[in-house]
Image (cartoon, grey):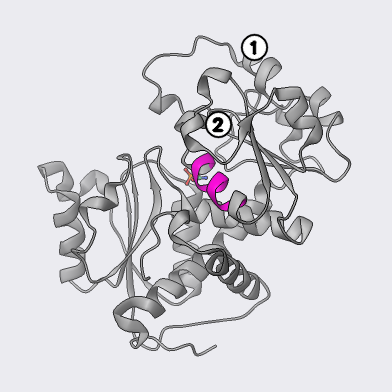
Amino acid sequence: MRNLLTMNALSVLEIEEIIGQAQDFAAGEGWFPDRPTYVANLFFEPSTRTKSSFEMAERKLGLQVIPFDAGTSSVLKGETLYDTARTLEAIGVNALVIRHEQDAYFAELAGRLNIAVINAGDGCGHHPTQSLLDLMTIKQEFGGFNGIKVAIIGDIRHSRVARSNADALKRLGANVVFSGPPEWFDERIGNGAYEDMDTAVKTADVVMLLRIQHERHAQNHHRTNADYLERFGLTKAREKSMKPRAIIMHPAPINRGVEIDSDLVECRRARIFKQMENGVYIRMAVLKRSLEQAKGGTVYENNH
Ligand code: CP
């Protein structure tokens, strides 16, 4: 399938293939399409990592990046997402990378475009390329997923990262638990039970922290940063209780001193910047896959 919208649309084999291709890119393999290929990145929500690393991946693959700025686009005149995407298709863009605040924004595009759509995050829904780069990071560390315990901690209810990762990790054989403020646990996510903070941190192989997504909260949660860190964050004391080989992950942006003590962000266990580095290779692999599979896979050839 040329689109990548959710993790649950990928089989375990496809996940393994994308991670394998990303590893090959990280090791120096190259791939370029055999004709000029155009990509536009449509970000309707703020982003540093995802937008920049898609753009880096696109440039490394020799793709032509067509600038799109939501803040100066005709979306401000009321143009729909479909009409925006259809316009870019009409002028010759081959793939769209889209981040949007609306859950499942892509339903509006389904079956109506002949070009690839890659989801760079939809509301509280899904963030498949973040999940893939997280999986790549875990695999690099532990060699696989079977029996690995991953504690996803924080604002679970509003997290597309939690949703995408829990689904994929469970299918890959990992044991997922959730922790953080109990009122932000969302059992509809499935694939893992709630565990108290201290137990989760002590027993996990991967402590995956999440940012409080203030922009998706209807009400202020009325906790100070220091109170949140003490009760639900990774303090220095909790870090000392972690298993010897356990690692710390965070999709970022990080709120230092809230979900994690600032001094731990680059400690020996932290893989946060490694995740970002892996994000470029994962996005190269996802773009290659989408472009090869567009139009029956006949337009682009593997020429590495
Ligand atoms: N992790 C992530 O999606 O970061 P950005 O919001 O900066 O893209």
Q: Is label 2 in contact with label 1 (beta carbons under 8 Å)?
A: no
Percent of width and height locating residue 44: 31, 44
Using residue 285 as the reference point, say whether residue 117 is left or right of it.
left
Residue 9 colored magenta? Answer: no
Lower sequence index among marks 2 and 1: 2
Say which quarter of the image contains residue 102: top left
Residue 50, position as x, y percentages in the image: 47, 52
The image shows residue 179 at horizontal and vertical percentages of: 63, 27
Magenta-drawn segment:
162-169
Q: What residue would you read off at disc 2? A: 211
In the depicted structure, whether residue 51 falls above or below residue 297: above
- Residue 258 in view in this figure: yes
Q: Disc 2 residue type? A: Arg
The residue indicated by pointer 1 is 227
Judging depth in this view, the residue of 304 and 163 nearest the camera is 163
- Residue 163 located within the stretch drawn in magenta: yes
131 vs 232, left or right, is left
